[in-house]
Amino acid sequence: MADARDDVNTIESEDGTTWVEIASVGTEDEANLLRGFLEAEGIRSELENVKFTEAPTTFGAMGDIRIYVAEEDETRALTLLRERNEAYARYVDDDDDTIVTDDGVAEIDDDAETEVEE
């Protein structure tokens, strides 16, 4: 393993790539969202799902889903995620009615009719 830090999970693949954990989230939806964001920026990523799902009910965080990128992409990926979080934080004001998209804050039309898919 090439200079891996002790506090970060890393995985060596058969092709010699060192994968470095850059984030850990609680749901598959959130993991796939982050993965899509990174891949849209040209950064390949891998997910490791260590979530415990055999319990009859779901309560608390029983494991997580880890997002890995190749070691050479770690700095750029972490920078992009930090910038993304900072950009969203500027829009969100702790108001549960705020919907933020990749284009910014979405306007909500309370008088709009619901579209039904057939």
Image: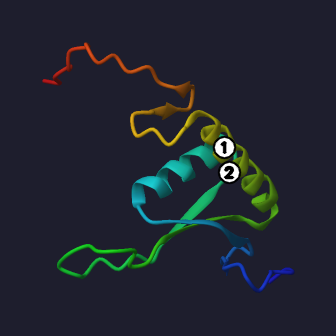
Q: Is residue 13 left or right of residue 53?
A: right
Q: Secondary structure at mark 1?
A: helix
Q: Quadrant of the C terminus?
A: top left
Measuring from the top left, give residue 115's x and y in whole percent: 20, 19
Is 93 located above or below residue 10 in the figure? above
Is 80 located above or below residue 110 in the figure? below
Q: Residue, x 46% and y 54% (percent of image)?
A: 30
Q: Residue, x 44% and y 66% (percent of image)?
A: 26
Residue pushed farthest right?
A: 3
Q: How is the image coloured?
A: rainbow
Label 2: few (<14), some (14–19) or many (≥20) C-alpha neighbours in 10 Å: some
Measuring from the top left, give residue 57's x and y in whole percent: 20, 75
Q: Which mark is residue 84?
A: 1
Residue pushed farthest left?
A: 118
Q: Residue, x 20% and y 20% (percent of image)?
A: 114
Q: Quadrant of the N terminus?
A: bottom right
- Marks 1/2 in contact by CB < 8 Å: the verdict is yes
Measuring from the top left, give residue 117's x and y in whole percent: 17, 24
105 and 26: which is toward the camera: 105
86 and 34: which is toward the camera: 86
Three-letter amino acid code of the residue under disc 2: Leu
Q: Is residue 101 left or right of residue 3?
A: left
- To which residue does mark 2 refer? 81
Three-letter amino acid code of the residue under disc 1: Arg
Q: Which mark is residue 116?
A: none
Distance (Cα) linking label 1 and label 2? 5 Å
Q: Secondary structure at mark 2?
A: helix
Is 88 located above or below residue 65 in the figure? above
